[in-house]
Image (cartoon, rainbow, N blue to C red):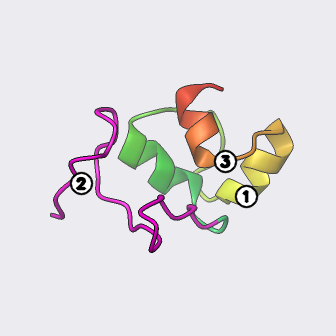
Amino acid sequence: MSKKCKNDAPWMRWYRSRNNDWRLRKKRNDTLLGTIEEQYDIDLWRRNDMKLGNYLDEKGINSLNDLITGK
């Protein structure tokens, strides 16, 4: 299991790769919702094989971060 970066927010559970300027990389849009639901312990009330990008487009949400934080 990877360690968290000391600058990560407390609600982040796992290490996410970062760009050269230490900003988090975007989550790939072809990630399955089942994976997101498991990692963040949420229920999105959609099929597990739906892709993240399709879900975000459907809901009009800009990013995974906005989905998780409810912004």
Quadrant of the frame with the N terminus:
bottom left
Stretch in magenta: 1-28
- Vertical comparison of 51 with 58: above or below: below
**Pair 3/2: label in front:** 2
Quadrant of the frame with the C terminus:
top right
Mark 1 nearby-residue class (10 Å; few <14, some 14–19, many ≥20): some
Q: Could you tell me which secondary element the residue under label 2 belongs to?
A: loop
Q: Is residue 45 magenta?
A: no
The amino acid pointed to by label 3 is Ser
- Vertical comparison of 38 with 45: above or below: below
The amino acid pointed to by label 2 is Cys
The residue wearing badge 3 is: 63
52 or 16: nearer the viewer: 16
**Pair 3/1: label in front:** 3
The residue wearing badge 2 is: 5
* Of the image marks 3 and 1, the number of the one nearer the N terminus: 1
* Of the image marks 2 and 1, the number of the one nearer the N terminus: 2
Contact, mark 2 vs mark 1 (Cβ under 8 Å): no
The amino acid pointed to by label 1 is Gly
59 relative position to 1: left or right:
right
Q: Position of residue 24 (x, y in %)?
A: 47, 59
- Magenta stretch prevailing secondary structure: loop
What residue is at 49 percent from the left and 50 percent from the top? 36
Disc 3/disc 2 C-alpha distance (Å): 21 Å
State the residue lying farthest toward the front: 21
Disc 3/disc 1 C-alpha distance (Å): 9 Å
Mark 3 nearby-residue class (10 Å; few <14, some 14–19, many ≥20): some
Disc 2/disc 1 C-alpha distance (Å): 26 Å
Q: Could you tell me which secondary element the residue under label 3 belongs to?
A: loop
Q: Could you tell me which secondary element the residue under label 1 belongs to?
A: helix
